[in-house]
Amino acid sequence: MTALDLLALGAIGLGAGFAAGLLGVGGGIVMVPALVLVLGFDQHVAQGTSLVVIIPAALAGSVTHYRNGRVSVRDAALLAAGGIGGALVGSISALSVDDTVLRRLFGAFLLVVAAQMVLGRGRRRSEASNPPIVEA
């Protein structure tokens, strides 16, 4: 690995961490494409690497939001329970898919989410029904 590769990895991590903290994304929407397109990772390795890297980044962002009263611990616990099961099934499924197909599925997913965000689709909870909650 060259010094330029190491610098690129640091920059990708910084960008993904910034996106995670600012936008609440897992960082994978930044990290996976960057690892594939900039450093030539295979899609499977990029996704697996992104999942490992996001653990400390998510922890740092979570602590910051928790300290500022922007976490619903109950909802987070329920989401985490489903997320663990989904991640296991999804990871096993990803390993059975060809790299090119997986890359295209990932790209299509990003396009669908982007379109929904731009078009303003999705249910919105009012601020009154969704106040900041920090539960111990």
Image (cartoon, rainbow, N blue to C red):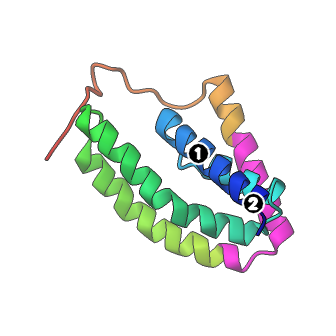
Image: 3 above or below 127? below
Question: At numbered mark 1, what does the secondary structure look like: helix, strand or loop?
Answer: helix
Where disc 2 sits, the SS reads helix
Q: Amino acid at mark 1?
A: Leu
Task: Please determine whether, in this image, residue 12 is positioned above or below residue 51.
Answer: above
Percent coordinates x, y for residue 50 in the rendering: 60, 61
Residue 50 lies left or right of residue 81; in this view the side is right
What residue would you read off at disc 1?
14
Residue 63's x, y, as percent?
30, 45
Residue 105 horizontal/vertical position (percent)? 77, 58
Tell me if residue 105 is in the magenta stretch.
yes
Q: In this orientation, does residue 92 appear?
A: yes
The answer to whether 38 is drawn above or below residue 91 in the figure is above
Q: Quadrant of the N terminus?
A: bottom right
Task: Please name the predominant secondary structure of the magenta segment in the image.
Answer: helix
Residue found 71% across the figure and 45% down from its top: 110
Residue 91 occupies quadrant: bottom right
Q: Which mark is residue 129?
A: none
Q: Which residues are magenta?
A: 94-112
